[in-house]
Image (tube, rainbow, N blue to C red):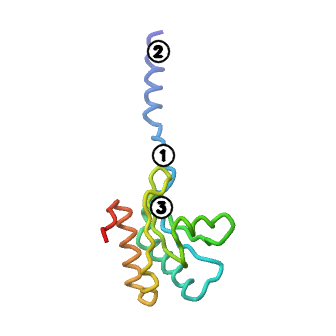
């Protein structure tokens, strides 16, 4: 009887060790949004393409590991109107958001995308640099 109990306890302990730890993180820590309206000019479409390419090229591992998410959202579509107020939007924008426990703790509108749309390397460096700061948890610089 003792032998059976010992074997069962050993098997139970081995099964417990083999179980993977539950994935506690359910949402990414950082989200990059490209937010656009219903009307989409050539420049707006180019900004979207450049944003997607920059984030995918610069942060493939973080996207795969679900630490970072990239979302393209029409903030004028039904149900998305809150983005306009949440991020004080006046036009199409790239917004970097940091979340803790699914709640927004800080965000930044990358307004310089409009200055850099015709300079792809500087655009990519700007978007990747700001995203990296959020991924690394660096505080926003004081004005």
Which-is-in-front pick, marks 2 and 1?
1
Q: Residue at x 47, y 37 (%)?
A: 19
Label 2 SS: helix
Quadrant in the rendering for residue 106: bottom left
The local crowd at label 2, few if under 14, some if 14 to 19, many if 20 or more residues have their Cα within 10 Å, is few
Q: Secondary structure at mark 3?
A: helix
86 left or right, relative to 79: left
Report which residue position mark 2 lands on: 5
Taking the spot 48% from the left edge, 9% from the top edge, the residue there is 1
Marks 3/2 in contact by CB < 8 Å: the verdict is no
What residue is disc 1 on? 23
Query: Mark 3 highlights which residue?
Result: 64
Q: Vertical placement of 20 versus 74: above or below?
A: above
Q: Earlier in the sequence, mark 1 or mark 3?
A: 1
Q: Nearer the viewer, residue 109 or 7?
A: 109
Percent x, y of residue 96:
45, 67
Q: Are marks 2 and 1 in contact (CB under 8 Å)?
A: no
Q: Residue at x 49, y 53 (%)?
A: 103
Note whether 110 is above or below 63 in the view shown: below
* Image spot of residue 66 (x, y percent): 48, 58
Q: Is the residue marked by circle 1 packed among few (<14), some (14-19), or many (20+) residues within 10 Å?
A: few
| Distance in Å between CA atoms under marks 1 and 3 | 15 Å
Q: Nearer the viewer, mark 3 or mark 2?
A: 3
**Which residue occupies the foreground of this view, 26 or 110?**
110
The residue at 53%/80% (across/down) is: 49
Residue 14 placement, left or right of 36: left
């Amino acid at each position: 009887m003792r032998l059976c109990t010992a074997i069962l306890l050993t098997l139970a302990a081995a099964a417990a060790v083999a179980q993977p730890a539950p994935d506690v993180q359910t949402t990414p820590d950082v989200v990059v949004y490209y937010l656009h309206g219903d009307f989409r000019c050539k420049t707006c479409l180019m900004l979207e393409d450049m944003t997607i390419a920059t984030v995918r090229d610069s942060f493939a591992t973080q996207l795969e590991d679900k630490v970072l998410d990239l979302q393209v959202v029409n903030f004028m579509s039904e149900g998305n109107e809150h983005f306009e107020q949440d991020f004080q939007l006046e036009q199409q924008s790239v917004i970097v958001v940091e979340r803790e426990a699914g709640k927004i703790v800080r965000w930044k509108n990358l307004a310089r995308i409009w200055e850099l749309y015709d300079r792809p390397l500087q655009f990519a460096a700007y978007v990747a640099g700001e995203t990296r700061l959020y991924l690394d948890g660096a505080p926003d610089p004081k004005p």
